Image (cartoon, rainbow, N blue to C red):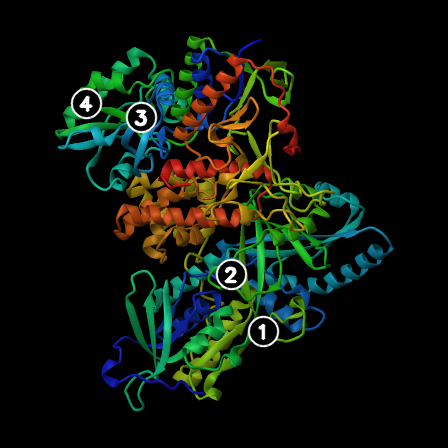
Amino acid sequence: MPVAMSVAEGALPSREVDVAIIGGGVNGTGVARDLALRGLRVCVFERNDLAFGASGNSSGMIHGGVRYLSQSPHVTESSCRDSGYIQSIAPHLLFRMPFLMPIKAGLKGRIAIELIDAYFKAYDDYQPLKHGQPHCRLDASDLARLEPGLVGAIVGGITFDEWGIDGARLCTLNALDAIEHGGEVFTHTTVERVVRAPEGAEGGRYVVEARDVSTQERIAVRAHVVVNATGAWSPVTASLGGLPQARVRVRPGKGIHVVLDRRLTNYGILSEAIDGRQIFLEPWQNVSILGTTDDDYYGDLDDVRATSEEVRYLVQGVARVFPSVRQARAIGTYAGVRPTLYAYGKNEDALSREHEIVDHAADGSPGVYSMIGGKLASYRLFSQELSDLVAPKDFDVSAPCSTHTRPLPGGESVPDALALAERAGITPVASRRLVYRHGQRALQILERAARRPSEKDMTCACEPVLEAEVRHVVKHELARDVHDVARRTRLGYGACGGMRCAARCGQIVAEERGLPPHEGFEMARSFVERQAATRIVAMGPEQARQEALSLAHLQASLGVEP
Amino acid sequence: MSGTVVVVGAGVAGASAALVAVRAGARVVVIDGGTGASTLWTGGIDAGAPPSEDARDAADALGVVLGEAMVVATSGFVRRVRGRDAALLDLSIAAERGEVGVVRCDRPGWDADGVARAAGGGMVALDANVLRHTDERVLPDADFAERHDDFERLGWLAERLRHAVTRSHRELKALLLPPSLGVEHARAAELTRLVGLPCGEATGLPGGPAGLRYERARDRLFAAEGIEVVVARAERATATSRGWRVTTDTQPIEGDALVLCAGGLVGGGLAYQPSEALPGAALPPTARPSFRCTVDVPVRLGAHGAPLDVPGSLFGVAPESVAWPLARDPLMQRVGILCDAEGRAGPRLYAAGELVADAPRTWLAALESGALAGIAAAADAVKGRPERPSSVAEAPASRP
């Protein structure tokens, strides 16, 4: 069924773009950037915040696709090449994350280590593409020296190199670059329907009608092409345009992660869960992350949460090789829903992580496309594929893709964090983290702070985040509340769970946006409550008392009734 | 030994019970296990019914001003309270005209301009150099507050504030300071007299001077009333032919009546202990409730007026189903010892404060329930009936 409804000519909106993109995840913002760089006018609608879904709740890796090596080596090759590209366009945002795969002793283990060794030898051929080191084969004593926390009868292990990334920052940077190339990005704006403009009317073929969920303001845009990049929400989005949901079927797979309060290991450590699935403990930014599960999900996509059973599954699995994970302090959990390509009858892990472009011309809606599937590591390639299709076909634009050569905002060069700390009079740790997140734009933020020295105050001491950075992300990176600031800066994601910084952050956001102060407190309350809700499922008996204290803390500073 | 009431816990409920019992003619021994919820108090009483006469006396003795007031938190949040620590500034008593001056002070956690803005009008940040030594920029709140126990220093502060008020050329009706006005006593009244304007603190975070002032006031009260204090952790209470024997980590203590005021989760009287000791551990052989008293005593734990169930789930209790903040009436806020209206949990056995099931977790409720239990326990102890407590034996013991 084509997009049937149409609007009267008099009601046509004056705002006009070439491409309207629905979804502010990594694919949506990636396509927006790609097309904007090719000179097209784009706009992005995001129902919640940038990176709200799977993009911001992933394992935070740009991996080389070692899993696909045996079936489809070309996927591994393109993944590795793309990982290399992302390193060159956002050098500040990637960090090396070597993984360690311990192998249990016994006859099976001795054969396994030979096979795995050979397998990684093949993977080594692709490592130069992503500037990784070749794998290493370690014996039991090497392993004990490198990771003393590993226990059990282990015959040896294999290391291999991967790269970590902050997925939420990646989305933000793509969105920023799209904006800087003439695009528009509307966050907290839900698309209500997509209708066809009347035949013969000048301008774009479609009208996208959206509503700002906090101000209730309505926005309508005319567009020649509409892209559905809403991940697990894709079928819902398709129905807003009157398209058959079956054309964009995904099989939503929920994945949860447990966040521990510090880096427990130097290496990412692979382990097997009770059902034989591969799970891991990885040092990521300044925390450790346990991941991940993969279960079919049928619940509310706007409110995905980990459960205590899922947390137990991960902790139990990792504790088999790294038992001290049980004593570690869990500071939160997060959950996302993968937009896996639909298949019936397979179990979750066997589903394809590949991606697919659906051209809805076949459904009678030329110029409407859906991006289905994909993963964080392949976002740039996927965006390029869509842009390579759309730009010549719908706009006769032959400009080639440049997203792999032009740096993302802040990625032009990476300033020396220690020198910067000294010059700006901030602590080296704060400077390091600031440069990690903003690259060259850290200079802009510190210039701001130099003009107003009170902005050098630390708003969040765990991460840490300076007041100037909070103000910067509200002003320049589309952050509208404390949750948004947290996604962009990791404020409140540290050990205190936002107890020490959310109120102050709320004040700053309210101030920057010209809102009354109580709205700032309300934002802070909502953030802290949400964080507590994610933490509670990972709580053991020792943490119960601390949680009670946290609540008292919140009550004391915000006057929130228990 | 005749006429002895043993109180386990030296928080607000314990102090109130001890005071009321000693004034009713009993000999009182308090077992003080250390820091708890009361010493982490920040100074504002948020909820609770108006207190009885006995509780009112106890509040006076502990240096707390009862009655409606408006206090400001260090975040700038203004809230209405039912009572307050005597050092806190009450915005509602200040004059109609003029602004409240928020004193600037370069210390972490204090942002005078932020407070003034967040309070939404009626406040203005005020420049005043109130730090005398450079180390005061980083001292913890409580250590900084202790410096104002010195009279000479308080005079110096008053002078600085008077200067600041004059220099500001504004009509000010009161001065708001960071949590800093004394540890031994609340110095707000003295400072008010010296400056000539109502002066007081904002409520700080747990672990600040308000909790320490409570501790000092309580210790003075115990000394003045002749209440014995044993610093120890109560481990176990067993019924004897006369009353109760409490085993601690140092010495056994005997008494005719026992009042348990060991606190809820924060105070440490109640522990959350799900079936699996830690996520991922092997399941225990038998199921048991996920809460227990940290003092081993034959009482029944419950919530919502009913005894606590043993969880039916294979994995025990899922924290998200019992904990805040998802549940509207979370078990963790309600669970405790099942008592009657007087706080009686068994013959000659009482509980008060956060340890009581369904009790509101607030200062005033602890004060009131402590007073009620104290009176009843003193009556039991002084009467000294040689009645063997037998019915409690039916109640299932909550054992780790």
Element type at mark 1? strand
Residue B274: quarter of image? top right
- Residue B358: x and y in percent read 48, 37
> Distance of mark 4 from mark 2, alpha carbons?
63 Å
Quick check: can you spot residue A490?
Answer: no
Residue A374: quarter of image? bottom right
Classify residue B31 as left or right of residue B112.
right
4 and 2 marks in contact (CB < 8 Å): no
Against B124, residue A413 (above or below) is below
Q: Nearer the viewer, mark 4 or mark 1?
A: 4
> Distance of mark 2 from mark 1, alpha carbons?
30 Å
Classify residue A295 as left or right of residue B10.
right
> Distance of mark 4 from mark 3, alpha carbons?
21 Å
Answer yes or no: are tags 4 and 1 on the same subunit: no
Mark 2 or 1, nearer chain start? 2
The amino acid beneath tag 2 is: Ser
- Residue A194: x and y in percent read 37, 78
Against A30, residue B313 (above or below) is above
> Tag on residue B197?
4
Observer-nearest of B389 and A306: B389
Q: In which quarter of the image is the N terminus of chain A?
A: bottom left
Answer yes or no: are tags 4 and 2 on the same subunit: no
The amino acid beneath tag 3 is: Leu
The residue that mark 3 highlights is B66
Q: Dot 4, crowdedness within 10 Å: few (<14), some or many (≥20)?
A: some
Q: Which of marks 4 and 2 is in front?
A: 4
Q: Dot 3, crowdedness within 10 Å: few (<14), some or many (≥20)?
A: some
> Tag on residue A341?
1
4 and 1 marks in contact (CB < 8 Å): no
Mark 4 or 3, nearer chain start? 3
